[in-house]
Amino acid sequence: MQAFFSEYGSQLISNILQHILISFSALFLGAVVAIPLGVLLTRTPKIASIVIGITSALQTIPSLALLTLMIPFLGVGVAPAIVALFIYSLLPILRNTYIGMKNVDPSYLDVSKGMGMTNLQSILSVEVPIALPTIMAGVRLAAVYVIAWATLASYIGAGGLGVLIFSGLDNYQPPLIFAGTIPVILLAIISDYLLGKLEDKLTPSALKEENE
């Protein structure tokens, strides 16, 4: 074990940092795009099924194929990996945002209108806080997907923990495979935990008391 870390320790740390950068850049972009879009789709139900259908179709593209499709436009490296993972992050966040917003009790909307709130005020102060647990469930699911799929980014020169995993597979070195796989699992678990804590922080206390 000591010999392994002496030889690969610095590479392992570098690959972990690359993996975090790629994964969370894609997840952040996915949330920034998919959450507002999901909210907007609740106001335009005629196109909601079309947009969600398109993101569902994108989700079915094999990971390596999508990464390869990025190369003619973005070359190799981090940029195409982030764009591909961003595309994969869209569906769970978009769908959960849409479902969460649609499932808000209409009585809350009536109250917000009665208080003289504008449509935007109602969205920000009433609907999004109520839908937040569902939205965050989508973000947490997307985080797990993105962290797992980011291992394939090494195929296009983006680095990450996939470098260790596939190097171990190519050279039949199980320690390298484990050294790449275990941090991926830990990153997924830690990310889910931290996003759960963020959800708890963002959820209004009155709503938490109501759900208990």
Image (cartoon, helix red, strand yellow):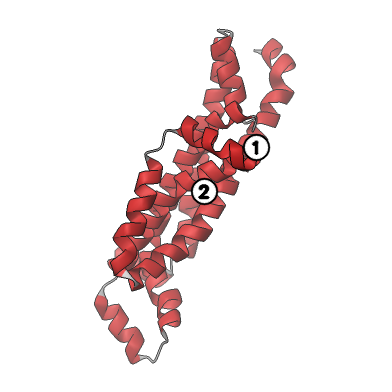
Q: Residues within 10 Å of mark 2 (few under 14, many from 20)?
A: few
Q: Which quadrant: the C terminus?
A: bottom left
User: Which is in the foreground here, disc 2 or disc 1?
Assistant: 1
Location of residue 176 by image quarter? top right
Residue at point 40%, 56% (across, down): 94
Q: Is residue 196 above or below residue 23?
A: below
Residue at point 40%, 69% (across, down): 40
- Note whether residue 145 is visible: yes
Q: Label 1 near label 2: C-beta < 8 Å?
A: no
Q: Is residue 168 above or below residue 112?
A: above
Question: Which secondary structure lies at badge 2?
Answer: helix
Residue at point 50%, 59% (across, down): 33
Residue positioned most to the top: 172
Task: Residue 127: give x, y in percent of width and height.
Answer: 37, 72
The numbered dot on residue 75 is: 1
Question: Which secondary structure lies at badge 1?
Answer: loop
Location of residue 88 by image quarter? top left
Task: Residue 48: give x, y in percent of width and height.
Answer: 32, 63
Q: Residues within 10 Å of mark 1 (few under 14, many from 20)?
A: some
Q: Is residue 160 above or below residue 112?
A: above
- Note whether residue 212 is visible: no
Task: Residue 29: give x, y in percent of width and height.
Answer: 55, 54
Instruction: Name the amino acid type tagged 1.
Output: Gly
Residue at point 40%, 67% (across, down): 39
Q: Is residue 138 left or right of residue 161?
A: left
Closer to the camera in the image, 85 or 188:
85
The numbered dot on residue 194 is: 2
Closer to the camera in the image, 158 or 179:
158
> Alpha carbon of mark 2 to alpha carbon of mark 1: how far?
33 Å
Q: Which quadrant: the N terminus?
A: top right
Location of residue 62 by image quarter? top left
